[in-house]
Image: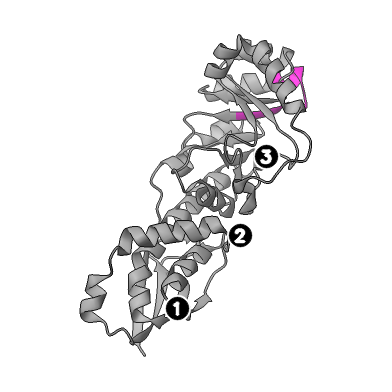
Amino acid sequence: MDWESRYIQEIVERALNEDVGAGNVTVAATVDPNTRSRAHIEAKQELVCAGLPLAVRVFRELDPDMRFAACVEEGQKVGRDGELLRLTGKASGILTGERTALNFLERLSGIATLTQQFVDEIAVTGAKIQVTRNATPGMRVLEQYAVRMGGGANWRGGLFDAVFLERNHIVLAGGVKAALDQAHSYASLRTHPRAMTAYEAVGMTPSGAEANALPVQIAVANENELREALSAGAEWLLLTDVQPEQARLCVRMARGIRPDCVVEIGGRITLANVRAYAEARPDYLAVDAITQSEPSAELTLLVDCRL
């Protein structure tokens, strides 16, 4: 992740403008502008840290001279009451940036923590956890980054980096074979070097895509659709809304017809059933719950002393 990118700068500025507005009236009423202090951010639960550089950017926007000492690395587990970051600078900057920095850090650490729980649950199966475009608008790059910090993977940063054929595309194209034929024809024209997208420019490349390739994935919901897709040349299948036993049969069938086919399972996958789906032996499990639920971690900022 490029923490100095324009994307990061703009998201920090928007967040601070939203919160601070015309000024922090509480700080203006109670804190001398020249007062300096030391403070730290600590965990109120066990979590996986993600987003510290973003929190630093928030505070530096308010006090360019603020000094920081990271107590953990990105992607590292932190125990309850463990310190994540120490900071020294203007008290007004610390208190004004507190909620914005914590909002970012809590959201990203919560996603990283939940991701690692899913990853741990299927550790011995060989399947990988990944997320796609199901994310908070404007926060997708950061949320997918948090997934990576939790040990997961990213697939499809946006509409620009892969062809994904689902029911609506198939209906409009005239059927599974017609949709795949059109997609493969289009993808073959896009395998030459291309300009870097805004998503890639901040340091994120989807796990399933090569820099100059345009993958084609198709969603199927049963054995008949799977056979039809494979006979039409499908190379990447997404099994949607199937039960674990049906998923096991579909994966076995796909491997028998085309051993090199990439198989992903998506749908209502939770911590309670993810192991059952992973035991079907797919390559990937798409888990929307990681970024669509409310997994924010609990953190707090505490002022240690006035300097």
Q: Indicate the quadrant containing the N terminus: top left, top right, bottom left or bottom right.
A: bottom right
Residue 39 percent coordinates (x, y): 39, 79
| Residue segment shown in magenta | 254-264
Q: Tell me the mark number nearer the camera, choosing from 3 and 2.
A: 2
The kind of residue on which mark 3 rests is Gly
In terms of depth relative to the viewer, which is nearer, 305 or 222?
A: 305
Q: Write the residue at 55% across / 38% down.
A: 132
Q: Are marks 1 and 2 in contact (CB under 8 Å)?
A: no
Residue 77 percent coordinates (x, y): 53, 62
Which quarter of the figure has residue 25?
bottom left
Residue 17 percent coordinates (x, y): 36, 61
Question: Is residue 154 positioned above or below 15 on the image?
Answer: above
Distance between the alpha carbons at the discs numbered 1 and 3: 41 Å
207 with respect to 257 (left or right): left
Q: In the rendered image, which residue does mark 1 sit on?
A: 87
Q: In the rendered image, which residue does mark 3 sit on?
A: 126
Q: In the rendered image, which residue does mark 2 sit on?
A: 2
Residue 129 percent coordinates (x, y): 59, 41
Residue 118 painted magenta: no
